[in-house]
Image: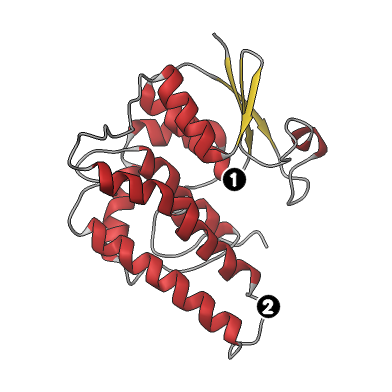
Amino acid sequence: MTITVHHLQVSQSERIPWLLEELGVPYTLKTYQRAPLLAPAAYKALHPSGAAPVIDDDGLVLAESGACVEYLARRHGAGRLFVDPADPDYPAFLYWWHWSNGTLQPAVARAMYVRGAAEDSPMRAVSREKLGRALQGLDQQLAKHAFIAGSALTAADIMTVFSLTTMRCFSPYSLAEYPNILQYLGRIGKREAYRTAMAKSDPDMEPALGADSPKPLL
C-alpha cells in the first residue's frame, strides 16, 4: 500500500497529512510550491480539477478535500474520526462536517473576493454578515464542547481548521471577538499529529493559531 499526498503548499491540502497523522496511516508527501500564487502546471496535471488536494492510493487518484478525508478514513483508518450514526453526537457531526466547506469556507472566500470593493459596498456588508454569523455560530458551539462535534476530535475538525488558520493568508480576518475559537485553536496546536503534519507540509510557515491573521499572500 502506497498513499501519496500531493500537497500544494499554503493550501487546504494540509488537511490530508493532518488526517493521516491522526490516523497513524503511513504516507508519502510530495510538496509543490505555488507559481507564484496558483498551483504550478505539474500540480494541475494531476487531476482534472487542477486543484488541491490530490491523493494517489496505489494508482487510484482522488481530489476534493471531503472526498479524500472520507476515503482515507474509511478505507485505511477503519472509519475513525467519523461518528457512528448510533452515537448521540452523530447529528452534530453530520452538520459540522458539511458546514465546514458548505458555509465557513465560502464565507471566508467571499470576504477575499470583495476586499477591493468600497468600504460601504453592499457586497462587503453581506460578506461581513455571512462570515460573522458563521464564526459566531462556531464560537457558540465551542463554548459547549472541546471539539466541534463533541468531546473528541473528528473529521469535522480536520475540515474546519484550515479556514480558521491558513486560509487567512489569503483572506485576512480577526478572531479576537471569538474566545472559544481561540481556545479551540490552542488545543489543536498542541496536538502532535497537527504539529507534525504542518511541519512536514509547510515547514517555513508558522501556523496561524492566534487572533491576528498572518501576512497576506494576496
**Dot 2: element:** loop
Type of amino acid under label 1: Ser
x 39%, y 58%: residue: 210
Residue 199 in sight in this render: no
Q: Above or below — where is 110 with respect to 98?
A: below
| Quadrant in which residue 8 is drawn | top right
| Quadrant in which residue 85 is drawn | top left
x 19%, y 51%: residue: 145
Q: Is residue 130 left or right of residue 186?
A: right
- Residue to which mark 1 is pinned: 11
- Residue to which mark 2 is pinned: 116
Mark 1 or 2 closer to N-term?
Answer: 1
Please tell me how crowded label 2 is: few (under 14), some (14-19), or many (20+) other residues with Cα within 10 Å: few
Instruction: Determine the residue located farthest toward the right in the rendered image.
Output: 41
Distance from disc 1 to disc 2, alpha carbons, whole Å, reads 22 Å
Residue 18 in sight in this render: yes
Type of amino acid under label 2: Gly
